[in-house]
Image (tube, rainbow, N blue to C red):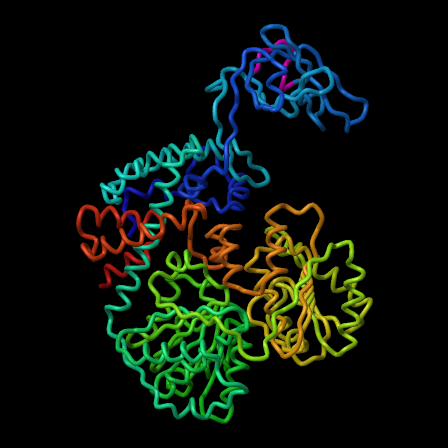
Amino acid sequence: MRPDILNPLFAEITALKGVGAALSKPLEKLGLARAVDVAFHLPTGFVDRLPRTELDAADAGRVIAITLTAVSYRFGSSPRSPARVQAVDAHGNTVSLVYFRGNSGWVKKLHPEGELRWVSGKLEQYGQELQLVHPESLPLDEVEAAGGREAIYRCSEGLTSKRIAALAAQAIERAPDLPEWIEPSLKARNDWPGWREALVRIHADPADAKARERLAYDEILANQLALLLVSGAARAKRGRALQGDGRLRDKLKLPYAPTGAQARTIREIEGDMAQSRPMLRLLQGDVGSGKTLVATMALLIAAEAGAQGAMLAPTEILARQHFDTLNRTLSGMGVRVAILTGRDKGRAREATLMGLAAGEIDILVGTHAIFQQGVEYRDLGLVVVDEQHRFGVAERLMLQSKALVPPHLLAMTATPIPRTLQLASHGEMDVSRLDEMPPGREPVETSVIAEDKLEAVIAGLGRHLDTGKQAYWVCPLVEESEKTDMAAAEARAAELTMRFGDRVGLVHGRMKGPEKDAVMARFAAGALGVLVATTVIEVGVDVPNATLIVIEHADRFGLAQLHQLRGRVGRGGGKSHCILLRGSGLSETSRARLALMRDTNDGFLIAERDLELRGAGELLGTRQSGEQQFRLTPPELMGPLLERANADARLLVDQDRDLKTARGEAARTALYLFERDAAVALLRSG
């Protein structure tokens, strides 16, 4: 149970004054559903308002705050003409206050003639006159200070930065003083404020480095502590040793010998599974490095030892692909493979569940459905989790609870994780890396082409199809809108169908499962030449004959996602191509991303750069994982603070495994505050 002292902070957003149903929606878009979310929604920057008593052309280009009186108005003949208010300062100097699309009634209400108002904005020199464009204006009795530093917050439609600041002030009021969880000498050495003081200070002054550092350290410490408790609990429990005799693996007919990296990783897994301590291993492998073969070998070891294996995939498409691959690979070997997804209903589902409970199924592949209530294994010995970053610690624990004794766990990710973040996201795991490519996999050749060359790209696609090869066409990612994504994909598919007829197929996130699978099956069978898609094809889709991928608006995607998408091609022999279509007016970050994609196929290098360009939270895929990740930690602080927090957390766990001392109790509160409380449940359960 969360400590009562934190309850006011974890109240619903509607507990804040002035928040009703209308305001809840734009707040929800920002992920702000509770008071704590607002308190942790830190400013992204600030504006310094220079308090002035007199207008001065020397201040042009700076943000000033001054008291002014409106003396006259000028409104254009057209609604598009700007409205101008002529105003004077206390010394009679004039300035023009300019409002575009401002109607006369609204402007006169904002600046009543003859009334003294507090006005703030960027002073500009326009010809011979001074002007303020869209300045803020308030009655004098509503102004707390004439100038000073004001925090700027990330907003959504219907919300101003000022409104968020006011809500943040209310949320901080609810934040209690908490016992100190940082080791006192470390706090003193870094000159860090207390937790609540740091929160107050960062909202007042976003440039306060010590406050920002303190909050980031708290969050990283809670994360490291949770990971250590999870791994400690897992390792403390006795599992069971699974030793295969090789009879099934010897029957496996492989098209090529495993790479050195695959062979090494299989040995590591075999060694782990032979211990009674449950395996906790993360397998990192770049797109196409052969993780599926390693997972297959691990599942066969479990089957040889008489245990069942479960393989968890994040999407229906990927689960069905794994099922098909395992069925093909293990055909004729006497290994029974089944699939279970949310879509499997009725008799088929019942038969699978009965077979699983009776031990007639050796390997179960599926989505979240494989660890829901009613799914019982006879003897679960190994869990393989694909695309690990999509699942949280809590979900892993649920799946492990399905076994009589804790099963061995192999987590896999095709999103290479930078060394810095490995500790942050998988600190409890042993790590294997597949850093060699299987023979025959050539690097994908990548070009960056401006969108105004679209016609030439479509003509090139036609020539590509004429050679009998297939292609993906990925449609632009539209911010936060599945509907718009779908519309963009449908429009592109319609245009390509006019050129290439029924060789064009379409998949997007809003299609029903069977419909999506039918299109994917036709593409995999070669009945379709072009698959137009939103990012539903990002993970795992395997069609060796597809050797071209076109990604529209590539500048809107993150590096990790572009690398994943590019990995859909180059899966057979021969040369593959990736075309990144870019918009005009690129930001420096977008330019750097696209240049890196053009220059390298090395996923580990791309991951390191992605961390620098995007930050930790997004890179770990926190939107998908459903777990709160790093909200208070800017990427540049992750590296410097992580090692320190990891060492501090280890020291605390070594000295006080059950968190019973005064500092341990304080750390327990921190786990609840930063929502790493899955670890507290482990303390209680021993």
Give the percent coordinates (x, y) of residue 507: 66, 67
Q: Quadrant of residue 74?
A: top right
Give the percent coordinates (x, y) of residue 94: 66, 11
Per the rendered image, the range of residues in magenta is 109-117
Give the percent coordinates (x, y) of residue 389: 45, 62
Horizontal arrangement in the rendering, residue 474 relative to residue 62 (left or right): right
The residue lying toward the viewer, choosing from 659 and 213, is: 213
Location of residue 443 with respect to 657 vertically, above or below: below
* Quarter of the figure with the C terminus: bottom left
Q: Which residue is at a point 43% across and 47% down the rendered structure image? A: 631
Give the percent coordinates (x, y) of residue 321: 55, 77
Instruction: Using the rendered image of the protein, determine whether residue 355 is visible from the camera's viewpoint.
Output: no
Location of residue 81 with respect to 626 vertically, above or below: above
Q: Which residue is at a point 37% across and 70% down the rendered structure image? A: 281
Residue lying farthest top? Answer: 91
Exactly how many numbered labels are in the figure? Answer: 0
The residue lying toward the viewer, choosing from 520 and 455, is: 455
Q: Quadrant of residue 311?
A: bottom left
State yes or no: residue 114 in magenta. yes
Horizontal arrangement in the rendering, residue 321 relative to residue 174 (left or right): right
State yes or no: residue 617 in magenta. no
The residue lying toward the viewer, choosing from 520 and 64, is: 64
